[in-house]
Amino acid sequence: QVPDLGAPLITNYGPEQYKAQSQNWVAVQDQRGVMYFGNSVGILEFDGQRWQLIPTPGKTTTRALASGPDGTIYYGSIGDLGYLAVPPTGKVSAVSLKEAIPEAERSFNDVWQVESCADGIYFLTRSRIFRLQGGKITALPGKFASSQACVLNGTLFYADIEKGICLVD
């Protein structure tokens, strides 16, 4: 009898192996099967063999990742948001979209969630929700509860501290 028969194969990786901070916030897999992890110093990429650190502008904590409908991975970090570019060389890099945000809306702290919906990619902070649609970013102001949003049938539902449960229509 094999005592582990039927048990899932689990491998644990520590900071000494992936060479970054010990705190990881989120994980997402791309269409190629590569894993990405939001870490306290950027984004970790793991292809099953090697770990790579993808620095974000400012090398800040990345708390949110999501895959868009075309397979693009979007990120949200402290004071920044953007996507991962995968050029033909294969060296993935973080591309900030902060300059696409209207100037009056560029000051924000943590992006707590990134959600892919039928009408765009949403980046949720406590003070505003940013929507990326057609290369343009718009902002919805409010007082939002962090990590309190979900997508149902392609529609974003979120918690506004003053208004209660809302949806983007």
Image (cartoon, rainbow, N blue to C red):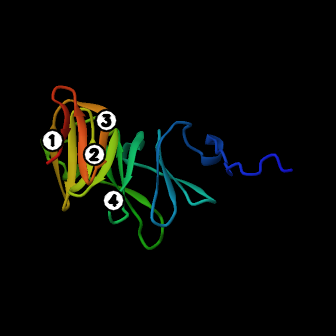
Tell me the mark number nearer the camera, choosing from 4 and 3.
3
- In percent of width and height, residue 82 lies at 31, 52
Sooner in the amino-acid sequence: mark 1 or mark 2: 2
- Residue, disc 3: 148
The residue shown at (18%, 62%) is 134
Q: Assign a secondary structure to mark 3.
A: strand
Q: Amino acid at mark 1?
A: Leu
- Residue, disc 4: 68
Q: CA distance from mark 4 to mark 3?
A: 19 Å
- Residue, disc 2: 123
Q: CA distance from mark 1 to mark 2?
A: 10 Å
Q: CA distance from mark 2 to mark 4?
A: 12 Å
Tell me the mark number nearer the camera, choosing from 3 and 2.
3
Sooner in the amino-acid sequence: mark 2 or mark 4: 4
Residue placed most toward the observer, 70 or 163: 163
The residue shown at (27%, 37%) is 125
Marks 3 and 2 in Cβ contact (< 8 Å): no
Residues packed near mark 4 inside 10 Å, few (<14), some (14 to 19) or many (20 plus): some
- Residue, disc 1: 140
User: Position of 66 compared to 10: left or right?
Assistant: left
Residues packed near mark 3 inside 10 Å, few (<14), some (14 to 19) or many (20 plus): some
Q: Amino acid at mark 2?
A: Phe
Residues packed near mark 1 inside 10 Å, few (<14), some (14 to 19) or many (20 plus): few
Residues packed near mark 2 inside 10 Å, few (<14), some (14 to 19) or many (20 plus): many
Q: Assign a secondary structure to mark 4.
A: loop
Q: Mark yes or no: residue 87 visible.
A: yes
Q: Amino acid at mark 4?
A: Gly
Q: CA distance from mark 3 to mark 2?
A: 12 Å
